[in-house]
Structures are given as C-alpha cells and as structure tokens.
Amino acid sequence: MTADTLIEGGRVFRGLAGGFSDALALKDGRVLALGDGARAAAGASTRRIDLGGRVVIPAFNEAHMHLLPYGLGLSQVNLRAEEVRTLDEVLKRIGTAAKAAPKGTWVLGRGYDHAELDVGRHPLASELDRVSPDNPVAIVRTCGHMSVANSMAMKLAGVGHNTPDPEGGVIERKNGALTGLFQERAMRLVRDVIPPPDEARMVGAIGAACDHLASLGFASATDMNVGMTAGMAEVAAYDAAKAAGRLTQRMWQVLAGNPEGIAQQAWAAGIRPMDGDDSLRWGAVKVFADGSAGGLTAAFFEPYIQGGTGVFTFPDEKIHDLLRLYHEQGWQLDIHAIGDAAIEQVLLGMEAADSEAHPFAGRRHRIEHCGFVTRDQRRRMKARGILPVPQPVFMYEFGDLYVKNLGPARSMQAYPMKTWLDDGAHPAASSDCPVSTVDPFVNLFTMLTRKTNRGTVMGPEERLTAAEAVHCYTWCGAYTQFAEDRRGTLEPGMQADIAVLSRDVFAIDPEELRAVQADLTLRDGATIFDRHGVFA
C-alpha cells in the first residue's frame, strides 16, 4: 500500500506510551506506518514533508473553551490584561468604539481584569457613561462570571436600585446606588437585552475561531455552553457552518443546562446524546455550580482573605435535580465547579444520581475546572470515573491573584496536574478561552514550570514533563470525548490529526516554549493550516 504522505527529518511523538519514531506515513486520512515501515510505504506519488529537525505531535485538543463566543469576541473591544493595564486605557478603548458606533447601538468589550488594572477595582457605570453617553455598554471580566454595564444598558435591562438580586447572582450596590457590576446569574439581566447575532454572523465567527485554532495546532475543540448567546439559533448556526465547510475543528458540543439554557429545548427538538458525527457531536450538558476564584465568586468552605465564601449558583436540591435529570437523559455531565465547596455540592449530587437503573460506570462525567479539590474529593471522583477538566493556564494568568485572594497554602495546590495524572484521572488540559489565552504553548509552559506570568512558582511538585503535558493536551482530551480510539496518538490506524511544531518542545528549555508555533496542521491528513504555504 503506497502512502499518501511521508513525514520525516525530525521526531514523531506517537503518544505517552509509544514514545518517539523518526518517520510517519499517512494513507486515506489515517496513520499508515511508522519508522522504517513508513519509509517503505512511500512511492513516487507520495507527498513528502521534511521536518528539518522539527517535531510532530498529535494535533492539540481544546477540551474546554467557548468557541462561538470566542469567535464573536474577535470583533468586540479587546480589554485583556496583556494589553490593558489601566482604567484610562479601558475607557479610551470603549470611548473609541462608541464614537465609531451608530448612536444607540451596543458597545461590547471582553477580558478586563480588575486585579490587573492600576486602580485595583472594576470600572464603574458612571465612568462608562462618561465615554459612551449615547450607547449602551457591557464589558465582561476575563473570567466570564461578572460584567459591568453603563446606565443606558441598565435602563434597557429594566434594572434599578430596587431590583432584587436573582437566584445565584448579585447586582452590586454601594451606598444604595448601582455601580454597574453584575455577578454570576445576574449577568443575564443585561445579556438578555443585547440583540443576538444573526446566523450569518455566527457562522462567520465559528469559522474564524476554527481557523485560528488550526493556526495554533488544534484539530479538535469544544463549545462549552451552547445556547447562552443566541439560544437554539446557535444549534442551527453550527449546522450551517458545517454545511458551508467552515468547521475545520472536530467539535464536541455542550448544551447550556442551567434553567435559562437550551438543554430542555434541544431535548424537545429531538437532539439526543451523541447525535451528529465525528465533525460535530452533541455530547454533554453544562450546569454552573459557582463562579471564579479570581472574581471572589468560586464557592469555598473557608473564606477568602477579603471575607466571604463565594457564590453558589443554585441551592443543593435544585442543582442535584438538574444533575439527575441530565444524567438520566443520557448526557455526559460537564459541570462547572472551581471552589472546594462547589465541587462537594456537585459530587454529592452526582453520587446521589448514580443508581442501578442509571449507573455512572462508563459515562465519563466531568467536573470542569475542578481547581481547588480535596484529597477525599479526588478519591470519590476516581471511584466513579468522574474526570477533571482543568485549565493549567489559569495558574499562569491568575496564580498571583489566587495567592492574594486565598493565601499561598490553598493557591499552590490548585490545578494539581501531576497528582491527577499519577492518580490515573486523565486530566484534559484546556484554556477556557476566551477566559484565558487559547495559545497552547503558554499552557505547555505552565504545565512544565508552574510559573505565573509574574514568575511566581506555584507548587513545583505539580510540574509535568513535556511528554506528559502533550499527553494531557491531546489524548486526555480525546478520552473525555469518547474518541481515544480514533485520535490523541499517532499509532497505525489512528486519524491523521497532526501538528508540526516549529521547535522540538520535548528538547528545548521550558522557558522557550512560549515562542514555539505550529507550522502545519492536518486533519484527516488534509492541510487545515500551513504557516509557510508549502503543503496547502
């Protein structure tokens, strides 16, 4: 059998168990052979890729991100801390966008971090009013669990100083006056009056996000809360994107399962667990249990240094009923829980839902983030096959804030990648983009060094080797999506989802990882990204 493609001239990482080879042959979208067998399979018609000392890995798998919101956010005002460190810069960018927008249209921004701003606080509605007097404004904090609206936006949402806090949410007031800050489920009050994007815009956003991921070496991704931007129209948008050939990523889709989500509408419309195919699969439902540790809304047993123990999205009985409902419908549970108290609430609900009629065995339910987990909780998760889906990059972007909010003892033990891996818990490294950067090389750097972006080392005993980190970012993600028999390694018969990296990440100094790029990305052996335009 003659290979379609032969890749040689550098190392090929087959996977954590398989180690390395020096050649790889592809045929009909699958791995055909390795090493000498790969070279023997090459013929006159075989496309040849010379690595020139570069390295090949299984394509990255982004196991937890929000793909459509990320794509839509590419056209919103960028307020991320990499570029925006002062309140004046926040207001300048919002003001510039407001001047360019028609009067009365919304100005949306994403990614500010109040802890990184020079004033050390959230922007105020009155400050947004000053730079955008004729346009409603809503800006979302980097964690996605709180936002600030200006006065026009709050008026459109019908929010006044006497508006009660909704269940699982907070409308901030100081001295009886609205500040503009909305936390957790209170954010819906403003979000619900923002005009949703139409299908054409959503398809464009999906395509743009998929293409950007391909440029970073990804061939598989997720949308972790489908329906929270435009309701059931998002399902139609994904179908349209697939029909138009815009899905360069293999998508694992997670329906929004909070009461304001679309999980029950999707069920009524006939969508069932594992519907779809390997390019677009409806597999899970998401429910939120708490908020974020950086925003002081993740739920903990012990209080934050500033006081308070966070926010539970639902009382126990309500979230336990939701978990049981979606488990018994057959969905994978992908449940957001960051603080140890929220993880406990979720675990208790999962344990109660595990029954003889509806057993947990083989279901691969997930706790998303699972950042501040106790030893007993890890033991109970392992006993029922419940998987952690963490974001190591949180330690890079927010680690110093964790220390400020929670103290060093709790913070240094957060997101324990090495412990999970040694436990056999299959932690699927991911980014929660657009909460954090989707750049996989920043995530790899964090897993190898446990350093924050300020250089603080956070629990060095949790460092991984490069091989372990790539395993978590490839095979473990595939495992959470019931796809480890098809992708996540480069063994014969596996899908030819491949990334060629600009440098050998297994040999260089970890400090150099953030400068690495993906030069070529293949899905089913076909090029979905080619940095140098050689193999298109």
Image (cartoon, rainbow, N blue to C red):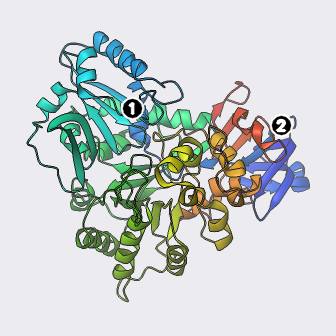
> Where residue 178 appears, x then y in whole percent?
18, 35
> Where residue 121 appears, x then y in whole percent?
37, 34
Residue at point 66%, 47% (across, down):
446
Question: Circles 1 and 2: CB distance less than 8 Å?
Answer: no
Considering depth in this image, is 11 or 374 the residue closer to the camera? 374
Residue at point 85%, 45% (across, down):
507
Question: Dividing the picture into quarters, in which one does residue 504 lie?
Answer: top right
Residue at point 91%, 54% (across, down):
36
| Residue picked out by circle 1 | 110
The crowding category of the residue bearing disc 2, from other C-alpha atoms within 10 Å (few below 14, some 14 to 19, many at least 20), is: some
Residue 477, placed above or below residue 457? below
The crowding category of the residue bearing disc 1, from other C-alpha atoms within 10 Å (few below 14, some 14 to 19, many at least 20), is: many
Amino acid tagged 1? Arg
Q: Distance between the residues labelled 1 and 2?
A: 38 Å
Tag shown at residue 35: none
Amino acid tagged 2? Leu
Is residue 29 in view?
no
